[in-house]
Each structure stands twice: as C-alpha cells, then as structure tokens.
Amino acid sequence: MKTYFRVLSYLRKYWPYLIGVLICVAVYTASTLLMMPLVRNITSSVGSGSISHFQNWIVDAVLLFLFLSLAKYGQNYWMALVGYRMLMDLRIQIFKNLQQLSMDFYANWRVGELISRTTNDTTLVQNTIVDVLAKLLPNFLTATGVLIYLFRINAKYTLAVIIIIPVYALFVGKIGGWLRNLSMRSREKLADIIVILQETLSNIRLVKAFTNERYEIKKYTVENTKNLRLEIQQVRISELRDPVMSFLNVLIVIFVFWLGGQEVINGTLTYDRLAEFLTGIALLPGPILAIGQVYINIQQSMVGAERFFELIDMKPSVKEKKNAVKLQNISGHVKFENLSFAYPQSEEILKNIELDVEPGQLVAIVGRSGAGKTTLVNMLPRFYDPTSGRILLDGYDIKDLAFSSLRNCIGIVTQENMLFNGTIKENIAYGNMSASEEQLIEAAKVANAHQFISLFPDGYDTFVGDRGVRLSGGQQQRLSIARAVLRDPRILILDEATSSLDSESEKLVQEALERLMKSRTTFVIAHRLSTVLHANKIIVLEDGRIVESGTHSELIAHAGTYKTLYDMQFKV
C-alpha cells in the first residue's frame, strides 16, 4: 500500500485537471443511475398506452445517453492528459537521478535494464494512475449507487445479489496475486531482452567480425521465448476472469428474473418495477468486472512502480558538500596524500598513494594491466572517492569543492569512443556549450581535425553516426581532443589516448595532444612508453602501489620495473 499511495502522490500538481475528471465522473455516475428510473418510466408509459409520455421518455433517454457519452469522453480525455504529463515527469525524474548517481552505480547495473526501467516501468506506473481515476473511481461509484438504488426498490433481491460479490472479490484477488508474480518475472525477463538488444547493437561490428550473428539471434530468441511463456501464462490467467464472472452474472440475472417473474404473476410486483430492478442488475456486471480488472492491472503495475522507486531512491555515493567551495583561477597543483581505494566488498586497488604534481607538469602513469592506473586518475574528478587519504587541488581537499568548480577545470581524452550520435559541431561543442563558432573551429584546428572535417560535404554539420561509426578511429580521437581544447582545462587526463591508432593517425593525434598539453597539468596513462619519454615525472604502479618514480633516464638507470617494461617494447 505504501508504494500505491506514493504513486498517487504524483497527482497533486495536476489538481486542476483532476477537478475536470471528478466533474465528469460525477456526471457519468449520475447519468448511469438515472437509467433505472428511466427504464421504469418508459415501461410504465408503454403499459399505460400514453404515446406522448412514451415519446417524451424516449427523448429523455437520448439526452441521457448524450450526457453519458460526453462525460465518458471528458473523463478519459482529462485523465489521459494527467497520465501522459505524469509519465513525462516520471521519466525526467528518473533520468535526473541517473545523472546524479556515481560511477560505482554504473559499474553494477546493466544499461539495458536501466533503459527498461526508465521506459517500460514508468509506463506501468502511469497505467496505475489512469486505471484508478478513469476506471476504478467511476465504476466504484456506479456500482455503489446502483446497489443503494436497488436496496430502495427491493432489499430482499438486492441482498441475494450482494452475496455473490465476496465470491467475485476472492476470485479476483487470487488472480491478482498470480499475475503480480508473473508480471515481476516478465519485467525482469523483458529487461534481459533489452540488455541483449542494446549490447548486440552497440557491438555489431564485433558480432559481424566474428560471424556470430546466428549466436546472437539464438540468444535473443531464447530470451524472447521465455518471456513469451510468461506472457501466455498471464493471458491464460487474466482471460479466465471474464467468462467465469460473466457466467456468475448470468446466474444472478436468471435468479432475479425467476423470483421477480413469479411475483409479477402473483400480482405482488409490477412489471415496470421488475424492469427497473433488472436494469440495475444489468448495470452491475460492467462496473464490477471493471473494478476486478483494475485491481489486476494495479497488481501488475505495482511491480513496475517498485522497480521505478528502487532507482529513484538510490543516492550517489559521491556527494557534493553543502556550501562547497567554487575555485577561481585554478593553477593546477595536484597532491595525492596517502590515498587508498577499494570497491565495495573488494580488495584494495590503490594503496597509500603519495604523489605531488606541480602546475604545468606532465606526469606519466605506467604499469601492467590491472595495476590501478585508470582508477587512480578517476579519483581526480571524483568519479570515485578514496576509502582513505585525500586529494588536494591548489591546497583544497577536492571533497570540499563544488563539482562544477572541480570538473570544469579537468579535460579527459580516453581510448574509448566518447561521441554522441549528432553532428561534428555538436560533439566538439559538448566541451563548452557557450563557445562561438570561431572558437569551435580554432579548437578543431589545434586538434588536427579541421582539415578532415572540411572535406565532408556538410562540414561541421556532418552526422558522425552512433558512437562516431562514420568516422575512423583517428578522426574520432581528434574530435575528442578538439572537445577538450574547447573546454580549456587547467588539468588534463589522457587515458591510453593513442593506443588503438595506426601510425599515421597516432602522429596527427600526438601532435594535437602536445599542443593541448602545453602549460597544463597533465596525467598520461600510456602503454606505448615512447609517448612519455619527456614527462617531468613517471610513476610506475604495481599492485596498486607506486613502486618507482622519476624521469625516464632516472628510471632506466634504476633498472627496475620501468626498465623491464621499456625493454619489452623496444628490445630488438
């Protein structure tokens, strides 16, 4: 119930629309209840032989159904407005929270599942709201009103009808429980399907390169087949409801007709009153069936609501302090003090890191795979917080700095493709949304990108495709560098920025990087040691610790781990 009321709380901001819904519900309910006396009067006028009265009641019937139809339209229209506006709010809210969550969250969640929860589960939450107001409320009021009216006509027959309602409730409740369990399993399976789809399409080049299309199709088919079985089970159970309840309704009508018919024959009940009562009986199944269906839908929707709120309630592990410091004119002095880091329930990846980097220095971080190089530089923009120790920027603990102040002074270029499916201009401008076109072009020139961009028919308005698929690796990398140039950061992080390029592309990218690194505090992670020979300081990480530190010539003379790595690359 807590989840249910939490979903309903999203309606508060839409009270003007809800007033319209409630007015329409009231008109709809009143119009439905008026059918019973209307049928009585029409039947009575037929019995009396009065043509004028009969015609008047027929006109009233037409007007009544007109009001009923208009109220139904208004109710559904206003509720649809509320539903779709709320759906937009839900998706924006969950997207905002996803933007605020820390990187450790994304290390543990699959992108496809997050997409499923942001799209499919929010739709289920919307359906709950629409069902409650557009279906449950009017049908509950109608059923209640009809029962009260029937009590006034004949309490004995009405009690006989009410006896069957608990049977309805037990039956619908049992079905709702089954469907809730199946819906949960189906939601999870649908998330698995989306994960496979997202991963396969994101890595389609790899799939084709290894001719694994059939494998991926089979994997996708297997998961869809599992989901199909769950969907069929849901249909089998939910569709059992209508025929069973319709049969019970028919039995009630026959039972009342049998009792009432005998009283009409015996003269203890008029046939117009019997017609009125039977009209009420005929009006009951629809609302009761609708209420049962709404209950079932709510049980299924609550699964989506719980999954939605699970994400909404998640808090970032890396948080900005209140009244955080906003630095101006950052020089770029970075100091790591006794820094250690471990992922939750994992061994330490970084251990007692001590490193002092003066403004404008180039620091190279080398070591074997898994030594903790990337993890170390991820500490600087606070993608993760150290488990102990601290990082100082210009003398300030970075935990005391505002995210904007810290991250706006850091530029990052990695070996991974970090391009959006937009134009070249949009991808470069991502580094500084307020930059002029002249500044953007200048950044492209610094990054050795302007020349190849100019060769495209659409120039800077050329679409790069999903993850930059229409560009070569070197072109993609130069756009990433142009984006960093446009940001004009005081601190630069280059994570294997040239490791996957051919010789010609590497030369162009390296030239661009040298221009970018000028007068900036730079951290370079490189497997190709030829790119860091002129670094002011080279640190060697091994098993999360700094085991060596110095210039290239000092480390070669030391004849330790660095020299071993160097010899492995350059020994003929």
Image (spheres, rainbow, N blue to C red):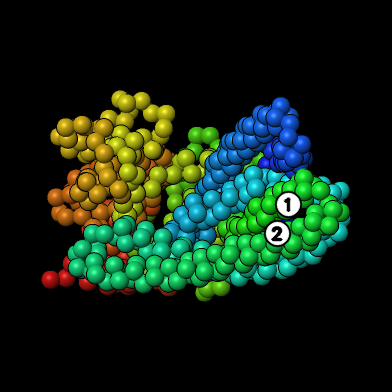
The location of residue 331, given as percent across then percent down, is 47, 40
**Alpha-carbon span between mark 2 and mark 1:** 7 Å
Q: Note whether residue 245 is visible.
A: no
Residues packed near mark 2 inside 10 Å, few (<14), some (14 to 19) or many (20 plus): some
Residue at 53% across, 34% down: 328
Residue at 51% across, 65% down: 235
Identity, as a three-letter code, of the amino acid under mark 1: Leu
Residues packed near mark 1 inside 10 Å, few (<14), some (14 to 19) or many (20 plus): many
The location of residue 124, given as percent across then percent down, is 56, 53
Residue 451 higher or lower than 371, as above or below:
above
Q: Which of the 4 quarters of the picture holds residue 260?
A: bottom right
Q: Is residue 188 left or right of residue 523?
A: right
The one nearer the camera, 80 or 254, is 254
Residue at 42% across, 29% down: 434
Q: Which mark is residue 278?
A: 1
Residue at 49% across, 38% down: 330
Label 1, secondary structure: give it: helix
The one nearer the camera, 124 or 170, is 170
Quadrant showing the C terminus: bottom left
Q: Earlier in the sequence, mark 2 or mark 1?
A: 2
Label 2, secondary structure: give it: helix
Q: Which of the 4 quarters of the picture holds residue 390?
A: bottom right
Q: Which mark is residue 253?
A: 2
Q: Are marks 2 and 1 in contact (CB under 8 Å)?
A: yes
